Image: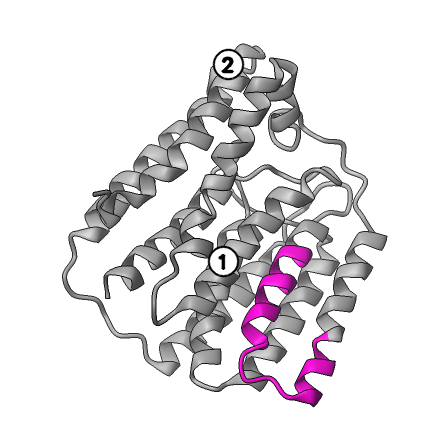
Amino acid sequence: MFHINYLPLIALPSVFIGAFVMLLNDIPTSIWIQNLIAAKLFVFLSFLMAKKTKSVPNTRAKNYFKIIAIYVLLGLTFVDAGIEGVHRWISLGPISLYASSILLPFLLILLGALVAKNQWWLSYIIVVNTAILLVLQPDASAVTAFVLSSCILLLYNVNRIRFVLLFLPLTLIIISWIQLDRLSPVPYVEDILFMAKGLGLGWFIIAFISLLILIIPFLFSPPEKRKLTSISLGLYFITTIITTFFRNFPVILMGYGISPIIGYFIAINWFIFHKRA
């Protein structure tokens, strides 16, 4: 039987395939090796975390502090110089982190906890404000993935008025696609799936399947007490994958960039913790 503690290993096929596709397309080793190192590091850290038998309980004050910290970090993307008016990154020396891909999975987890405690209105305000920040960056993929997945959470304990109010964040999705950025794609970031297809249809199919594997635990085997949050995370990741076919957006784990790797490991370790609970 597959032990739940080994679940972080499901992230490796996408990372390895992406690295191999880059290698076969003569992308410098210094590019794709970063993904391999990051993935192996976070798998190792996940195994260490799985050995912990005790956890620090989350209080309401701690969750509020974490949400404020997420807002501050998203706000820092506008302090960063950005690229051609696009502000999605936080620069730490030579390293640029794609902020939303790290922070949004964590925020969805926190929102799930708020909704479970009947804090619907606070959750709604957080969703709308976060979506507005993402629209301003602009990042249509992040807006779409975050709003759709958070609406799954907000449908919990919904009434007629609350249901109507969900059209506001959904409208922000439309706005985000109207004002798309004009950044040119980086082949080994946004077009990695098509680089795989260039090696043969079989490569493309294997690569795409490796991405779909990432969402299987969240959608098809959610933790009994946190099903809604798990489904929300699954929808978030599959939406980020789908949007890459419509515009130039990073392909998570497979394309170059350690930020989506961090975001995914935040989600999968949350999943493991609640699956074992």
Q: Is residue 155 magenta?
A: yes
What amino acid is at disc 1? Answer: Leu
Q: Quadrant of residue 54?
A: bottom left
Asked whether 47 or 73 is in front, the reply is 47
Determine the residue positioned at 75% across, 40% down: 246
Magenta stretch: dominant secondary structure: helix
For this view, does 81 lie left or right of residue 217? right
Q: Which residue is mark 2?
A: 23
For this view, does 190 lie left or right of residue 180? left
In three-dimensional space, the C-alpha distance between marks 2 and 1, rounded to whole angstroms, equals 31 Å
Vertical placement of residue 118 versus 198, above or below? below
Residue 184 percent across, percent down from the top left: 76, 32
Residue 211 percent across, percent down from the top left: 51, 37
Q: How is the image coloured?
A: one colour
Number of other residues with Cα within 10 Å of mark 1, as a class: few under 14, some 14 to 19, many 20 or more = many
Q: Which residues are magenta?
A: 143-166
Q: Disc 1 on helix, strand or loop?
A: helix
Residue 233 percent across, percent down from the top left: 49, 58
- The label nearer to you, 2 versus 1, is 1
Vertical placement of residue 141 versus 252, above or below? below
Number of other residues with Cα within 10 Å of mark 2, as a class: few under 14, some 14 to 19, many 20 or more = some
* Residue found at the far right of this picture: 178
Per the rendering, the mark at residue 233 is 1
Determine the residue positioned at 66% across, 24% down: 194
